[in-house]
Amino acid sequence: MRLLVTGGSGFLGGFVLREAAVRGHTCLALARSEAAAGSVSLAGATPLAGDLGDSAPQLARVFAAAGCDALVNLASLGFGHAPGIVAAAEKAGLARSVFVSTTAVTTSLPAASKRVRLAAEQCIRSSRLDWTIVRPTMIYGASGDRNLSRLLTVLRRTPVLPVPGGGTRLQPVHVADLADAILTATERASAVGRTYDVAGPHPLTLAELLAISAGAVNGRTRFVPVPLAPVVTAIRGYERLSKRPRIRAEQVLRLAEDKAFAIDDAVRDLGYAPRPFAAGILAEACAMGFAIAPVHTHMPKCGSSA
């Protein structure tokens, strides 16, 4: 297939573009800067000058000129671009379209982006497109994933770590498994009109996730449970003082929410078979140069698929 990819220069985008090339697909990737064009070129795609912030008619001209069979939208749905993307895809005749959303739309918190993302999903569902929506959980799997690579760095260096909300469940998804699911959804007609939650094989408590991650970096961090409320208060103060806060209160509050999701539909329709978290996080630690020999006996060795 000939695929038009948005968000191809991002973390997930590189994995999708490389996996698409392995599967024999030809990818054209929207790029709004020279840096983005260089990034998608390195991943095996042909850059296509354009910006999702362009008007729908202008975007439609770009989409139509690409001459593609399907749209794979990896770009965030949290910035209000969905109506323009949908309209451009419809006008360009790009009926088959796969959109990546997030399981974060299920949060009970008044997150600013939740309303925008849910409106985007509704726009997609009410369109004339042969759509599929893929909702990943927390994505990990390589340095720069903005989630667990930071945690691995902390666990490598920190002897004691305060942990708020330790009883909640999480189900991170490896970026390569997610890329596989996205492309399989694009290829299969049975996925049209469906929304898939895409997560790891099993939920883990935060305590389990931390212990496995610490084992992956040979860390001996001692985890100390702390009340959630004072931590949130302190971070809100930090947010007010910092122009670019590296952590936000909303992120910590999310730790108190259950983030376990059923993946049965993806398993059934997409043949989805995510790797165990222990194997995925150890591979990430190895790639970051943190893992030498496992401390815990339940951890596989670097390079092992077990």
Image (cartoon, grey):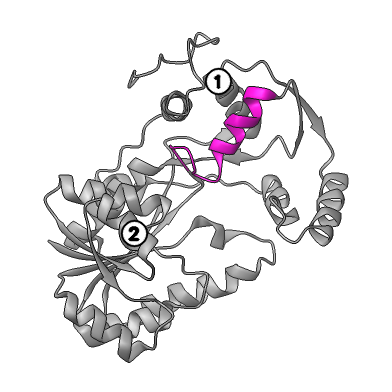
What's the residue at 24%, 43% (across, down)? Answer: 271
Q: In this view, does 48 lie above or below 225?
A: below
What's the residue at 50%, 56% (across, down)? Answer: 103
Query: Residue under circle 2?
Result: 8
Q: Can you give x and y, in whole percent of width and height, for residue 191 in the image?
A: 25, 60
The segment highlighted magenta reads 140-157
Q: Nearer the viewer, residue 226 or 45?
A: 45
Whether residues under marks 1 and 2 lie with C-beta atoms below 8 angstroms apart, the answer is no
Q: Which of 113 and 256 is in front in this view?
A: 113
Crowding around mark 2 (Cα neighbors within 10 Å: few <14, some 14 to 19, many 20+) is many
Q: Is residue 79 left or right of residue 192?
A: right
Mark toward the start of the polypeptide (1 vs 2): 2
State the separation of the CA atoms marked 1 and 2: 30 Å
Residue 7 visible in the snapshot: no
Q: In this view, does 293 lie to the left or right of 239?
A: left
Residue type, label 2: Gly
Query: Residue under circle 1?
Result: 217
Q: Can you give x and y, in whole percent of width and height, for residue 161 in the image?
A: 75, 28
| Secondary structure of residue under mark 1 | loop
- Does residue 152 show up magenta in the picture? yes
Mark drawn on residue 157: none
Q: Can you give x and y, in whole percent of width and height, for residue 36 in the image?
A: 37, 61
Q: Can you give x and y, in whole percent of width and height, for residue 35 in the image?
A: 39, 60
> Which image quadrant for residue 149?
top right
What's the residue at 24%, 78% (across, down)? Answer: 63
Q: Nearer the viewer, residue 8 or 133?
A: 8
- Does residue 261 show up magenta in the picture? no
